[in-house]
């Protein structure tokens, strides 16, 4: 669930970013560095234009908009266990999609659908299943713009994680934040994130920071992900990032052991290349190295059944992203 935080803060507070660039004769908001746009009066359905974190029509960056949807695959290559004999690899398929936004003036209601399917292959850890583990989250956020410089918001995220047979696979998370535009090149958000997951409570402060030293470069922190992106041209950009993730699934009792939870935490250091395929659709390739990896299996009373570190190893990811 923690890995979803980067999607939430990246998508909720950068939801309407489109491909970069501006027309020479456009009216520019001096506070945010974006073209001044008008939206329909009253209640309407559709994509809002959030001045605060948008790259849309921005004069401070040539990078494309933040993604608001993607489908992707990631393969974690085989790596040995540190504390026992055996090894593990994994395959993950993911789908992240917006649901039609609702807007009223400076108020915006955004919701998303996020699904992952993870399958481990291992030897030496019998409590780690080789069947597909599913995660389904539906983040719902409310945002309020306060002029050109301030934004505030909160979200709630019910989720379901595990195999299809285990009982009570549901969990919930929530968060809130407030952000401020210091200059068109520097934007900062401070918030908090809380989750309740199978009897475990987790709380952490969360920040989003965006800094653009020039129009071709952007440095950012989005919750548990940080990185730098560089625009080669209007159709191609590259970047590097470091990301922490720690999903947990609930597993049905079987011949290997009792009903239990499986947590897999890791840090991915990645290089990314992304190219425009058609209009707002982009294809990306990620290659990198995973370290700080741990697999922990507990019963429902939080007693450890199996636990091991995993040695560092490479991973490869492919995705199609929709950037608006």
Image (cartoon, helix red, strand yellow):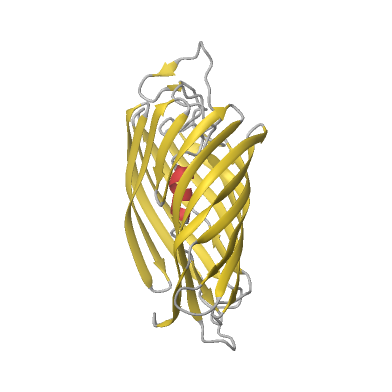
Left or right of residue 322: residue 306:
left
Choose top left, top right, bottom left or bottom right for residue 44.
Answer: top right
Work out which residue is located at the far top of the displayed protein and give it: 25
Counting from the top left corner in percent of width and height, residue 322 is at 61, 40
In the displayed structure, would residue 168 be above or below residue 25? below
The one of 27 and 217 positioned closer to us in this rendering: 217
> Residue at 62% across / 30% down in the picture?
235
Residue 80: give x, y in percent of width and height: 53, 71
Percent coordinates x, y for residue 154 in the rendering = 38, 48
Vertical arrangement, residue 317 with respect to residue 12, above or below: below
Q: In this view, does 294 lie above or below 124?
A: above
Furthest residue toward right:
278
Of residue 193 and residue 278, the one placed in the foreground of this image is: 278
**Residue 310 position in % (x across, y down):** 48, 69
Residue at screen point 47% across, 36% down: 104
The quarter of the rendered structure image containing the C terminus is top right
Q: Can residue 203 be seen in this view?
A: yes
Can residue 118 be seen here? The reply is no
């Amino acid at each position: 669930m923690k890995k979803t935080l980067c999607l939430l803060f990246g998508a909720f507070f950068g939801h309407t970013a489109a491909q970069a660039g501006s027309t020479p004769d456009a009216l520019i908001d001096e506070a945010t560095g974006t073209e001044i746009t008008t939206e329909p009066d009253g209640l309407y359905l559709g994509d809002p234009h959030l001045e605060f974190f948008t790259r849309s029509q921005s004069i401070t960056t040539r990078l494309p908009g933040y993604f608001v949807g993607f489908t992707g695959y990631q393969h974690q290559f085989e790596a040995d266990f540190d504390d026992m004999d055996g090894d593990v690899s994994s395959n993950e398929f993911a789908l992240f999609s917006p649901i039609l936004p609702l807007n009223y003036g400076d108020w915006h209601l955004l919701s998303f659908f996020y699904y992952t399917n993870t399958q481990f292959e291992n030897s030496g850890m019998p409590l780690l299943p080789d069947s597909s583990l599913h995660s389904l989250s539906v983040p719902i956020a409310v945002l309020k713009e306060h002029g050109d410089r301030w934004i505030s918001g909160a979200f709630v995220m019910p989720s379901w994680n595990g195999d299809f047979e285990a009982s009570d696979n549901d969990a919930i998370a929530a968060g809130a934040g407030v952000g401020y535009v210091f200059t068109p090149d520097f934007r900062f958000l401070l918030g908090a994130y809380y989750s309740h997951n199978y009897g475990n409570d987790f709380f952490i402060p969360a920040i989003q920071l965006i800094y653009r030293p020039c129009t071709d470069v952007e440095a950012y922190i989005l919750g548990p992900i940080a990185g730098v992106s560089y625009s080669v041209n209007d159709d191609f950009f590259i970047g590097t990032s470091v990301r922490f993730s720690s999903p947990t699934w609930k597993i049905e009792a079987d011949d290997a052991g009792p009903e239990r939870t499986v947590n897999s935490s890791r840090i991915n250091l990645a290089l990314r290349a992304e190219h425009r395929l058609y209009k707002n659709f982009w294809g990306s390739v990620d290659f990198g190295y995973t370290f700080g990896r741990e697999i922990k299996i507990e019963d429902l009373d939080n007693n450890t059944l199996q636990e091991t570190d995993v040695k560092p190893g490479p991973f490869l990811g492919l995705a199609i992203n929709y950037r608006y």
